[in-house]
Image: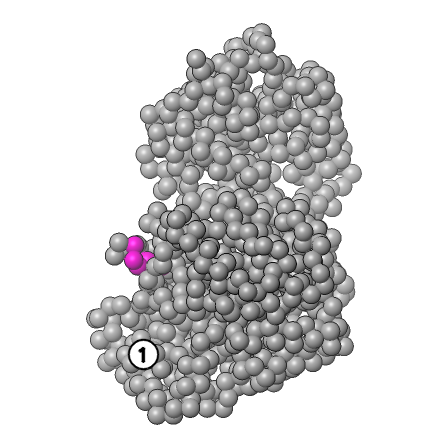
Amino acid sequence: MLPAPYDAILKELHRFMPADRVYTDPLRTLAYGTDASFYRLIPKIVVDTDSEDEVVRILHVVNTHGVAVTFRAAGTSLSGQAISDSVLVRLGDGWRHYRIFDDAAKIELEPGIIGSQANRYLAPHGKKIGPDPASIDTCKIGGIVANNASGMCCGVAENSYKTLHSMRLVLVDGTPLDTGDPASRENFAKSHAHILDGLADMRARVLANKVLAERIRHKFKIKNTTGYSLNAIVDFEDPFEILQHLLVGSEGTLAFISKVVYNTVVEHPHKASALMRFPDIRSACRAATALRGGAVSAAEIMDRASLRSVQDKPGMPEGLDKLGPDACALLVEVRAETAKELDKKIAKVKETIKDIEPLEPHRFTPDPVEFGKLWNVRKGLFPAVGAVREAGTTVIIEDVAFPIESLADGALDLQELFRKHGYDKAIIFGHALEGNLHFVFTQDFNGQAEIDRYEGFMEDVTDLVANKYEGSLKAEHGTGRNMAHFVELEWGRDAFALMREIKELFDPRGLLNPGVIINDDPRAHLKDLKPLPVADDLIDRCIECGFCEPVCPSRTLTLTPRQRIVAYREIARQKDAGEAAQTQKAFHDSYDYDGEATCAADGLCGTRCPVAIDTGKFIKQYRAWGHGRWENAVASFAAGATGLTVHAVSGALRVAGAAHDVLGDRAMDGMASGLHKFSGKRIPRWNTSMPRAATPSRLEPKPAADRVVYFPSCVARHMGAEKHDPDKTAIRDRTLSLLAKAGYEVVYPANMTKLCCGQPWESKGFMKQADEKLQELECALRAASNGGEYPILCDTSPCLYRMQEHIKGLNLLEPVQFAVQYLADRLEFTPVNRKVALHITCSSRKMGLAPIMENLARQCAREVVVPEEIFCCGFAGDRGFNYPELNEASLKDLREQLDGCTMGYSTSRTCEIGLSLHGKVPYKNFLFLLDEASWPKG
């Protein structure tokens, strides 16, 4: 039961919000309420909103009851500004509309669009949005604007504040305002004249106070997100401009941002980078100061501790391990419209810093692969610290800015504070052109002594930055709860009083995100600290950043990888604390569906995770923990009798296919739905795209000079085409046709009907059985390939990925890899005259094949569509039969992107079932397209 008044609020919300978008259960309020900071508040109610009208009505409800509300975008905030112990409102998928106009000089974005997605929309126009935070692949426009998030290149010239054109917002009383719409401005001027008059009066008073006005201008010459954007008051005369620019960086404390229009910036096509190595921090800072305002787009400083943390990792530039104890690096990037202009800029950079002695000559590279390696140094710093920390500790990344002329002294003083407070592994890096330094350290909050150490350290840091150097306590990460108590220390009494006045003007009852930016509790930054109990080795390194979330197929259905880890940590905490058995069981039961059953375990999360955590591997382990003797016995029997198992599945497909022919789509689908529902999901959910039993192969291998081992996966061997697919050819025949054209003789492994890579067992957590099947397959493949002499082709990417992961010494290839390495020089490809869809499986993505597969597809078809924001289909082997809602959630946006497509292609038969069902076009193996579009060279 919810306490009053939240019980009444819940009833009112249910009057206009769908029940499946309002959450009060312990698991989801905890999981959905977690952000990337080291603070923890658990909301009473979480609401997923899809429209401005819903936001307006939610605000009316919270106003009626006088309770706090916090708005959340992606939850990548680091300072505690996206958490609540009251009502938390998250952005649903309804907030993803955009519009590019004025010859791409402007882009209108809703707050639910991920930053890098906005850049993909603009890329064909040679433009991008100005802000470039490190989390741009995860964070959303709402959070980027609300935090005035910046990054390595945008500095203070191209952040949200500087590139904002107009904004649509909703005030705490539910009143909308569109600053780009004259009619909306006129109406607002009538209904809320007191706000506009108040802002005009503030501006007059600030300009009359020359000391305060000058202080505001001075503070924003470097990066600053501490407190409100007071520069709006001195920069603009129009109250509407002041208002909308105050919203930038306001962290949800003044209004809800429902739309923003950015002035776009140029994305230069030519780039080059150099990792400049200097003998010490002071030399590197001198170089950064000299380069500021010149030819460089970015200059990332990295101290010796930073470089040491990554120097032994694969792919790092040579020589990092040989640098002296005080060495420092500056990673510089130059951008230009043409290659000639790029060369001129590089020459200018070298000339500018020629008198600053480096450890070695500066070498720029325009090669994307090479400068990618250089930037991997910078990108690897934060995860390097996170990966080596002790279990149960958190990683803290602080974010300050010094006046550029004091950057070296500030960095050296920070290093001295690390030594004073015992943070021996702390590292410093940052955006040197803006005087912005990040420092990263590990912290244990599990004991009072450690909390006291952190408190002493932060007192010294705030004194150093705010008093000694008059810098910014927060340069780009937002004030949040972390620095709210220190805002007055940095800004002074008069400026802080102005901030209080702004908050009072917009939110007189203090309902919007209280405790953020303005907080009178001197110990607020030491309260509500997030517990990180030791849970399991596979997930203990998780820093809960949320970078994994955009690629998770269950992100809109149940939980994301971050949330799965958060919830399991709570299971561990409850167990350690000895909480009531009933409480533990209820939470565990919820996790069995939200955390385990609806996890595709595809591993894509690991490709986005800064510390390379594959939550899917953990979930497979979790499944293994739940298996008893009976389950293992059944799994062992099925593994030992694979041929019989496959034969049984083929028989079931024949029976289902016959029933489908008799009953038709509608009746068969209704019956299958009922059986699935009333069996408690024990009976797999048949659907209209279900494959028929595979037909026998009609072709036989032909002798040829070169040989290839072809291993059709067990899924491909027993699953044929679906009813509505006009091409009923067996995949084995298509593969044999393709290989024959290329001049290859096909060799099959012996006893193929019994062979399997073990993937069906591994995905369910039967690791022993999975490994036994893999070992059996390995022996057969070694024999068939003559000890690795012949390449081995498997038609199913997930199976091949598992084989590559565990079998060494054999040349194992999936369709795309095989085509590039063994077909490209033997076959001509002529595009078929069709518009086709392409789905790149999770396994293919993990193997780095996405761009290669797309390029190959474009050689084979007139037009190729790769649907946006669909990374995993959610079918997850056979999980789509038992939990079809996972597949449906992942592919809900597929059909609308396939307009005009007549066929789709992938490299996994089970994925193709779900893709066909929800895309409404047949999907087939990519080998079909390769065969159709090719013929022998010469």
Q: Quadrant of residue 392?
A: bottom right
- At 73% from the left and 73% from the top, the residue drawn is 419
The N terminus: image quadrant: bottom right
- At 29% from the left and 76% from the top, the residue drawn is 240
Residue 437 visible in image? yes
- Magenta stretch in the rendered image: 104-109
- At 71% from the left and 25% from the top, the residue drawn is 778
Residue 174 visible in image? no
Return the x and y of residue 765 as percentages of the image width and height: 69, 40
The C terminus: image quadrant: top left
Near-viewer residue (730 or 300): 300
Q: State the residue lying farthest toward the top.
A: 703
Q: Is residue 108 magenta?
A: yes
Q: Quadrant of residue 213?
A: bottom left
Return the x and y of residue 858 as percentages of the image width and height: 40, 31
Near-viewer residue (3 or 120): 120
- At 45% from the left and 35% from the top, the residue drawn is 854
- 769 displayed left or right of 274: right
Near-viewer residue (675 or 113): 113
Return the x and y of residue 486 as percentages of the image width and height: 56, 82
User: What residue is pinned by disc 1?
Assistant: 236
- Compared to residue 660, the image places residue 742 above or below, namely above
- Compared to residue 725, the image places residue 769 above or below, namely below
Q: State the residue lying farthest toward the front.
A: 355
Task: Considering the whole magenta stretch, tell me its main secondary structure.
Answer: strand
Near-viewer residue (520 or 423): 423
Query: Which kind of residue does numbered mark 1 sit on?
Result: Phe
